[in-house]
Image: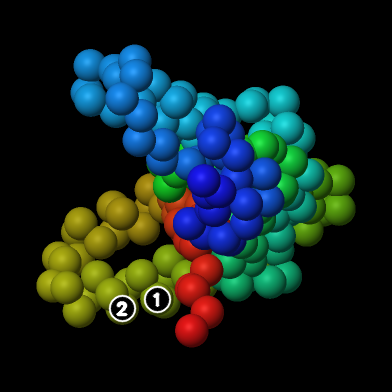
Amino acid sequence: MEQTCSRCHQPVNVDDRYCPSCGLPQLIYAAESPNSAGQPDRWGEAVRDANSIAWKPALRAALSLAIPAGLFCSMLSPLGILGLIFMAAAGAWVVALYMRSQRPAWITVATGARLGLVTGVLGGWTAAAMTGTSLYAMRFWLHQGNLFDNFWQNLVNQQMTQQWTAMGVDVQTMASAKAWLLSPEGRAGWVLFGICFLLATLLVLGVAGGALGARFLARPPRSKS
């Protein structure tokens, strides 16, 4: 009896573990050699294959997209906060490229999240390196340190002071905090905190993009009425 794929409805051979057209694992009910969970071994192998990652093509796809996305997401990027969208899109795009190069072309959401994690790590380190290099070059090579110093002083003396006053912080504590923030150590610590926060944000966005990419790309199409 001829069998068809439940997703694309193309003919499938009885012994095929995956659809030759769309790559969907085929659930085959067979009485012989069931595993301990009562499922056929071929289905267990299909699930294991969907959860495993071929790291060579995965890293190639992640590198090709994470590095440009990391450049767009650096703290000095002209795109600003809109650049963060590129990291989530890169995570989903890496999943699409990986699925296109693999057979079966089907992965789980957890596997997509792992691909997004790799993309977020690579993109985050690229953004951090780009931010640090740009700040160093602008201060020591281009001699534009006064721009950052004036911006930081205005931020601390105006915006932060207004926020602390609204929160009811006493004058002595406020003066101590301002003195530390305006010191070289305070400025360096604040920049380091911003870079670490950017790394964590890009990591979360990469994981979310990879998981969503696997979720929607692996979704079977609606059957035609």
Q: Are marks 1 and 2 in contact (CB under 8 Å)?
A: yes
Front position in the image: 147 or 45: 45
Q: Amino acid at mark 2?
A: Gln
Total labels: the figure holds 2
Seen at 56% across and 48% down, the residue is: 2
Instruction: Locate residue 136, reporting x and y percent.
Output: 74, 44
Front position in the image: 206 or 174: 206
Instruction: Locate residue 148, reporting x and y percent.
Output: 64, 61
Seen at 39% across and 21% down, the residue is: 41
Mark 2 sits on what residue? 162
Instruction: Locate residue 159, reporting x and y percent.
Output: 40, 76
Numbered label attached to residue 159: 1
Left or right, residue 172 beside residue 117: left
Residue 74 lies in quadrant: bottom right
**Can I make out residue 133 in this image?**
no
Q: Name the element at disc 2.
A: helix
Residue 163 lies in quadrant: bottom left
Label 1 packing within 10 angstroms: few (<14), some (14-19), many (20+):
few
Front position in the image: 130 or 219: 219
What's the distance in space between the residues labelled 1 and 2, CA to CA? 5 Å
Identify whether 29 is placed above or below 176. Answer: above
Left or right, residue 24 beside residue 125: left
Label 2 packing within 10 angstroms: few (<14), some (14-19), many (20+):
few
Left or right, residue 91 beside residue 41: right
Numbered label attached to residue 127: none
**Can I make out residue 159 in this image?**
yes
In the image, farthest residue toward the front: 1
Seen at 71% across and 47% down, the residue is: 100
Q: Amino acid at mark 1?
A: Gln
Q: Name the element at disc 1.
A: helix
Seen at 41% across and 31% down, the residue is: 43
Front position in the image: 105 or 87: 105
